[in-house]
Amino acid sequence: MIPNNNGATLSFEVFPPTSKSSIDSLYHSLSQMEDLAPEFISVTCSNQQLSLTDSTVKIAQHIQQQHQVPSIVHLTAAYLNKGEVDDILEVLRQKNIRNILALRGDILPDKPRGTDFQYASDLISYIKGQDDRFSISAACYPEGHPESDNTVADIHHLREKIQAGADQLVTQMFFDNESFYQFQEKCQLAGIDVPILAGIMPVINKRQAERIIRTADIQLPRKFLAILDKYGDNPVALKDAGTAYAIDQIVDLVTQGAAGIHLYTMNKAETARRIYTATNSLFGIQETVEIS
Ligand code: FAD
């Protein structure tokens, strides 16, 4: 699960769909992803979802049982109390799911918050205190978290997540690799030495592109915007160019030593396969040691 310095890993993220037909379609996608042998597949959760165990955990269990691929369950804690987290941990133990991406989650303006977990670090230390056999991943933001006052505070709070027990970090999507390299350096300076997996989102349709432009708090490089501008109304070309852009990012990141690539698949096996096919030989390559 945790990269072991034997070369970069490739992992995937999927999300729980809302309708029955899309669940069937997700299960079909997962069956198409199995032979790509991802290091793990993580399953997102929603703050507003009624039951984590009915959706995220069910899919994670399916991934492990049907496809023999380790799964990571995303868990947001802003609206949970300790008793609820205990119950979730018990379900995860029963289903042999040992990996959690521990998050605070977004704050919804109209929903009263719980007081047990103010930040992700509170959740991480709580889980580790309850059962340190869980392996914990945490979120990080190469261009800063939107609520954060400044980079120093952001990195400081990120270090608290590691001190609380996070074993690896997964980044927010980014489209400018320089922001990832600069972030890695800041982490090194702050003594954050766990693997940092680069979150890569292939942008393959117009709706997705429009949402990113509207909401993303991240740099959108000129070459990325040019693709959206030129091919926005040509679905096939946009898919080709968006996939190629992600491949280009991945080649650069793996070549420059990123610990791993975490692909936001948007539940699309075809995208994962195209990227896998184009980059597969780059993963898992051990560093060569010169012997004089
Ligand atoms: P935290 O790490 O708690 O940070 C939140 C903010 O608080 C930051 O600005 C941080 O600098 C600040 N902070 C932290 N500690 C302190 C402190 N002690 N004092 C003052 N300020 C502090 N959302 C979902 O709803 N479902 C998902 O499945 C999901 N998956 C994600 C996966 C990844 C890889 C990423 C990057 C994000 C994901 N998110 C998901 C989004 C995430 O929930 C939001 O970005 C949320 O706003 C922050 O969660 P966090 O765990 O990073 O929070």
Image: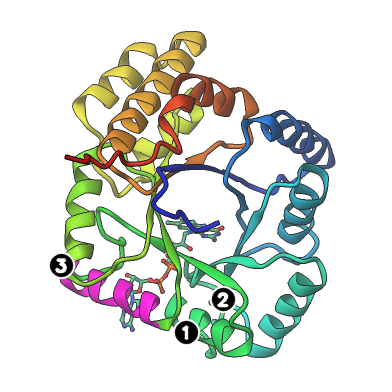
Name the main secondary structure of what is drawn in magenta.
Answer: helix
Check the image and report above or below for 205 versus 126. above
Front residue of this view, candidates 158 and 54: 158
Query: Residue at (22%, 41%) from the top-left corner?
Result: 291
Region in magenta: 151-163
Residue 84, magenta (yes or no) = no
* Mark 3 vs mark 2: in front: 3
Residue 5: x and y in percent read 39, 52
Residue located at (70% from left, 83% from top):
84
Q: Nearer the viewer, mark 1 or mark 3?
A: 3
Residue carrying label 1: 122
User: Residue 147: x and y, percent?
Assistant: 30, 67
Q: Amino acid at mark 2?
A: Ala
Q: Which residue is mark 3?
A: 189
Q: Marks 1 and 2: in contact by CB < 8 Å?
A: yes
Q: CA distance from mark 1 to mark 3?
A: 24 Å
Element marked by disc 2: loop
